[in-house]
Amino acid sequence: MGEIAGVARHVMHAATKAPYLEHDEERELALRWRDHRDDAALHRLTSAHLRLVLSVAARFRRYGLSASDLVQEGSVGLLEAALRFEPERNIRFSTYAAWWVRASMQDYVLRNWSIVRGGTSSSQKALFFNLRRVKARAERNGDSIGDAMYGDIATALKVSRRDVEAMDARLSGPDLSLNAPVAGPDQAEHMEFLVDGEPLPDERVGDTIDGERRLARLRQALSMLNERELKIVYERRLTEESTTLEALGQRLGISKERVRQIENRALAKLRAALCDWQPVAEAAYA
């Protein structure tokens, strides 16, 4: 609590001055806020539970985040709890609000503990906080998390083993800026050693030109086929789902064997045309 007292003294002061509420008084304040939106009632209800916010914030200080920010996030959770609280359920407000305060702080930790955004699903939250707890306990005992423990954790938290391994890898190393210098005399940055798997600009341009030339060649070759040959080649080779020989034969009024003969003849024409490409067509792209 010392850290929080040094960072959020005004909250500590307000928390210690706020009187505890009896059950009936707490219920009356909650009803006034819910039914009449009485701001004074809301203020008294939340002020009396600032101790709860400070207590929960103390549990999250090991994540290296600002204590005052944790208290602010917890206060947001406290207000959310007041907005959703149902006094007729006959439970104490502190019992209900504790979940919202803790959830708000957990969300804040997940958003800010690393520059790399992690998963925000309930299973990923449970994995993050429970794996940290398991790792801390193992370190205190002088142990390390091994492959066997990955499977047990995955089963207990109902996540995949790959998720556990990935989270463990993220927890094991700090964030590293791409602009941080690499150890060495030249002081190069990490970014300079990243490999881009995409083609270079001149390669992309060359691929585009080559693709256009191949398309022009194919169009010229197809223009040498007659109407029936073109239809058969299109139905058999150029559609997502190839039409059967029998279906084509019925549509054209010929046997499927005849369709096969025409297809083979058309393909032979195309091969010959593509192999005997005229340089004149190439000149159009020079």
Image (cartoon, grey):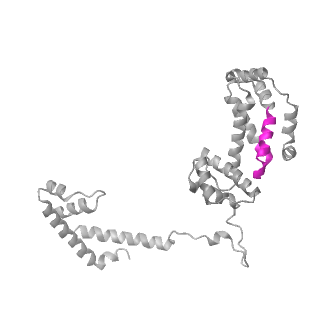
Camera-side residue of 285 and 204: 204
Quick check: is 63 in the magenta stretch? yes
Residue 226 visible within the image:
no
Residue 181 versus residue 65 in the image, above or below: below
Residue 150 locus on image (x, y percent): 61, 56
Q: Quadrant of residue 175?
A: bottom right
Residue 216 visible within the image:
yes
Residue 254 locus on image (x, y percent): 11, 58
Camera-side residue of 54 and 117: 54
Residue 197 locus on image (x, y percent): 53, 69
Left or right placement of residue 170 versus residue 254 in this view = right
Location of the C terminus by quadrant is bottom left
Camera-side residue of 97 and 232: 97
Location of the N terminus by quadrant is top right
- Identify the residue at image location x=72%, y=38%: 101
The region drawn magenta spans 49-71
